[in-house]
Amino acid sequence: MKELWRLGKIIRIMGKHGFGDITERLFKGEKKRPVDQEAKEWTAKNGFPSPQRVRRALEELGPSFIKLGQLMSTRADIFPTEYIEEFTKLQDQVPPVPFNKIRDIIQKELRRPLEEIFAEFTSESMAAASVAQVHMAKLFSGEQVAV
Ligand SMILES: Nc1ncnc2c1ncn2[C@@H]1O[C@H](COP(=O)(O)OP(=O)(O)O)[C@@H](O)[C@H]1O
Ligand SMILES: [Mg+2]
């Protein structure tokens, strides 16, 4: 049941980003869900979703798909340059998790306020990818660290 729900979500996100024709072909006869009009027009005109749409779909589909995109970014022998450029963004330029959430996670794991752990902590991330999000910080010893 959980798998079915996940599959439905994957199909919905793919439709939104211009892969509607693919999911429609896979599930012929299923009741059609409305797909994003702009995405549909782009696909109709160009025959395939744009590199940006593919990258955004992978981002929205979550960590496993971002990891897949990272792998694809290393295969310039398979994908055109425009796609490689977009997939490469999945290595470190995924939209970051807001700082207050990052603060909560660190404080819960280390069981102390952030200010007691680090002398300085940069709220803006320097990279965000499939699982990791990296912030620069300084320890009370003065040592510069990447968290
Ligand atoms: N110790 C570090 N110092 C600086 N940047 C880092 C460090 N570790 C990771 N990063 C940056 O964060 C990005 C994501 O980290 P990574 O370990 O590859 O996680 P993911 O599995 O989410 O791809 C890397 O591509 C890199 O740009
Ligand atoms: Mg990585």
Image: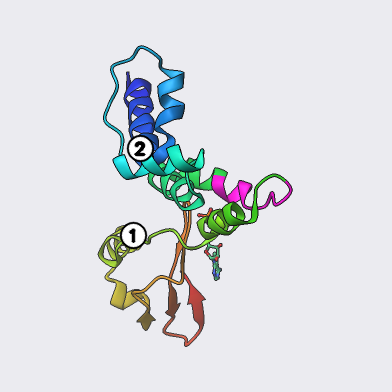
User: In terms of depth relative to the viewer, which is nearer, 11 or 146?
Assistant: 11
Tell me which corner region of the image, top left, top right, bottom left or bottom right, holds residue 7.
top left
**Label placed on residue 13:** 2
Q: For ligand 1, tell me if the residue under mark 1 lies within 8 Å.
A: no
- Total marks in image: 2
Question: Does 106 lie within the magenta span?
Answer: no
Tag 1: Cα neighbours inside 10 Å, few (<14), some, or many (≥20)?
A: few
Hey, what amino acid is under mark 1?
Val
Question: Height in image: 23 above or below 43?
Answer: above
At which x and y percent is residue 125? 40, 70
Horizontal arrangement in the rendering, residue 13 relative to residue 81 (left or right):
left
Tag 2: Cα neighbours inside 10 Å, few (<14), some, or many (≥20)?
A: many
At which x and y percent is residue 88? 57, 58
Horizontal arrangement in the rendering, residue 52 relative to residue 96 (left or right):
right
Mark 1 vs mark 2: in front: 2
Secondary element type, mark 2? helix
Span shown in magenta? 69-77
User: In terms of depth relative to the viewer, which is nearer, 24 or 110?
Assistant: 24
Q: Which residue ends up furthest to the bottom in the rendered image?
A: 142
- Give the distance between the C-alpha atoms of the residues marked 1 and 2, in whole angstroms: 20 Å
CB atoms at circles 1 and 2 under 8 Å apart?
no
Hey, what amino acid is under mark 2?
Ile
- Circle 1 residue: 97
Secondary element type, mark 1? loop
Quadrant position of ligand 2: bottom right
Tell me which corner region of the image, top left, top right, bottom left or bottom right, holds residue 38.
top left
User: In terms of depth relative to the viewer, which is nearer, 8 or 33?
Assistant: 33
Give the position of the N terminus as an image quadrant. top left
